Image: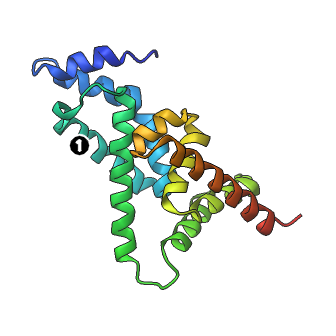
Amino acid sequence: MKINEEEIIELMTSDKTREKGVRLMMDAFQSRLYWHIRRIIVDHDLAQDVLQDTFIKAYQNFHQFKRDSQLYTWLYRIATNESLQQLNKLKRMQKSDEGSEYHLQNLVAENASADADEIQVLLQKAIQSLPEKQKLVFNIRYYDELPFEEISKILDMSLSTCKTNYHYAKEKIENYIRENHEI
């Protein structure tokens, strides 16, 4: 299905067609946003909740969409912020001293399907060990294959900062896999 962002925007700006616009927006972006959120949150059920919150926020705040970026960039930004808020809630609720990165790495292992490649699980654990900004930049660049210009808009950081975070993330992931992969 070819996404027509202009059609969605037009439908969303009119009270009469807003419901249809929301349905089209959800159909067009649900899968991509779910996987973006899931890579941050890891847990399926929480990712579903955050996805729902993302669409509710987009619906409630559509009047704030300035059209200075693409619609999906704006939605990714909302999804990212909602995901980070959820992670912060989880961090506050954490009772253990091991920290949220350890918790997220365990979630990766728990949520891995039985036929998941060992290297895929290792990659996910490596990603979860990264600092937040590096993790976000890496996930968006690696999985969604977005250009750094879009990533900088989504994450509200400079182009050079995005590239630097990606470079460091790649290095750390390679080292993590090298150190933890049993040959």
Q: Nearer the viewer, residue 32 or 67?
A: 67
Would you place residue 66 above or below residue 118 in this image? above
Taking 6 as reference, is 59 left or right? left
Colour pattern of the rendering: rainbow
Taking 160 as reference, is 19 left or right? left
Disc 1 residue type? Lys
Report the residue at 32% width, 43% height from top.
78
Would you place residue 132 above or below residue 17 in this image? below
Would you place residue 83 above or below residue 13 in this image? below
Indicate the quadrant containing the C terminus: top left, top right, bottom left or bottom right.
Answer: bottom right
Taking 106 as reference, is 155 left or right? left
Q: Position of residue 3 (x, y in %)?
A: 41, 18
Q: Position of residue 32 (x, y in %)?
A: 47, 35
Q: Nearer the viewer, residue 24 or 65?
A: 65
Q: Which residue is mark 1?
A: 57
Q: Position of residue 38 (x, y in %)?
A: 48, 50
Q: Nearer the viewer, residue 117 or 133?
A: 133
SS label for mark 1 = helix
Counting other residues with Cα less than 10 Å from the Cα at mark 1, is it few (<14), some (14-19), or many (20 or more)? some
Report the residue at 13% width, 19% height from top.
14
Report the residue at 41% width, 52% height from top.
47
Q: Position of residue 6 (x, y in %)?
A: 31, 15
Residue 79, located in which quarter of the rendered image? Answer: top left
Give the mark count. 1
Residue at the right extreme?
183
